Amino acid sequence: MNTQEIEIVFANEKLTLNNQRCLFWKRKIMLVLSDLHLGKAAHFRKSGIAIPKLVTVDDLNRLENLLIHYSPEELVIVGDLVHAETNKEINLFNILASKFPTIRIVLVRGNHDRFSNEQLVAMGINEVLNVFQADPISFSHNFVTELDSHWIVGHIHPGVRIEMPTKRFMRLPCFVVTDTHIVLPAFSRFTGLDTQYNMSKKAKYFAFDEKTIFKIEHF
């Protein structure tokens, strides 16, 4: 796994963004990601759309490597852990969670997380919340507008569309950062990209691919 990083300051805290679709908050020893969408690939296959079975396995292997790399005390999933009904991919997550019994896993409910708290706990989740707070930052799956507060959110699956010298365009996932919000990229590679999403003229975009992560002022 080729992990490339870039450090930013948000809410007067140093946060590390990486090209593996998550961020690390060193002071809190916390790994943060969003939109894993367990079961999405299986849901498409059930509908007759040929999706490789290794899509989710690859995502979970990447997560396992990140947990080893950063050794967090806490893993915060900012919504949409589960895409659809009970499926084999949920069992794979449970197996992964059991490998790291000392890591506290917090799920901030997303619009796809329709399981009961009991079902989520059985998957290895330690706490399920609608909003998670770790002073001075709060976490919500959907965008929240509150004065004098700082939020990390998911849901959007943000991306950028970059014009290349060949006059062709490249679409890349990204982090979106403003003074009050960070929008996380989808952790799962099997998601679409919203390249039309524009939070504000002051937003900073940190795009990435398998080899690097870089800042884009305008696109």
Image (tube, rainbow, N blue to C red):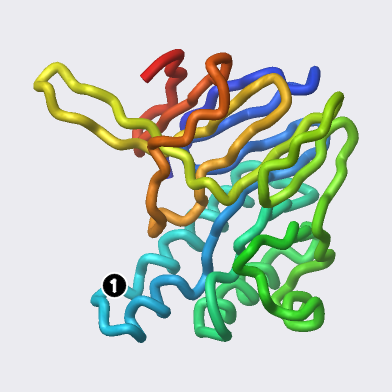
In this rendering, is residue 162 above or below 24?
A: above
Q: Residue at x 78, y 58 (%)?
A: 106
In this rendering, is residue 214 above or below 182?
A: above
Q: Report the residue that reaches farthest toward the left.
A: 166
In the image, residue 11 lies at what x, y percent? Answer: 79, 22
Q: Residue at x 58, y 78 (%)?
A: 90
Q: Residue at x 60, y 44 (%)?
A: 69
Occupied quadrant, residue 112 = bottom right
Task: Specify the quadrant that holds the N terminus.
Answer: top left
In the image, residue 48 lies at what x, y percent? Answer: 27, 84
> Image check: 162 left or right of 137?
left
In this rendering, is residue 64 above or below 195?
A: below
Camera-side residue of 107 and 176: 176
Count of labels in the image:
1
> Image check: 214 left or right of 204?
left
- Residue at the disc numbered 1: 51
> Image check: 46 left or right of 139?
left
Amino acid type of the residue tagged 1 in the rendering: Ile
Secondary structure under the numbered disc 1 in the rendered image:
loop
Mark 1 Cα-neighbour bin, 10 Å: few <14, some 14–19, many ≥20: some
Camera-side residue of 201 and 124: 201
Task: Specify the quadrant that holds the C terminus.
Answer: top left
Camera-side residue of 8 and 92: 8
In the image, residue 92 lies at what x, y percent? Answer: 55, 76
Occupied quadrant, residue 216 = top left
In the image, residue 205 lies at what x, y percent? Answer: 49, 24
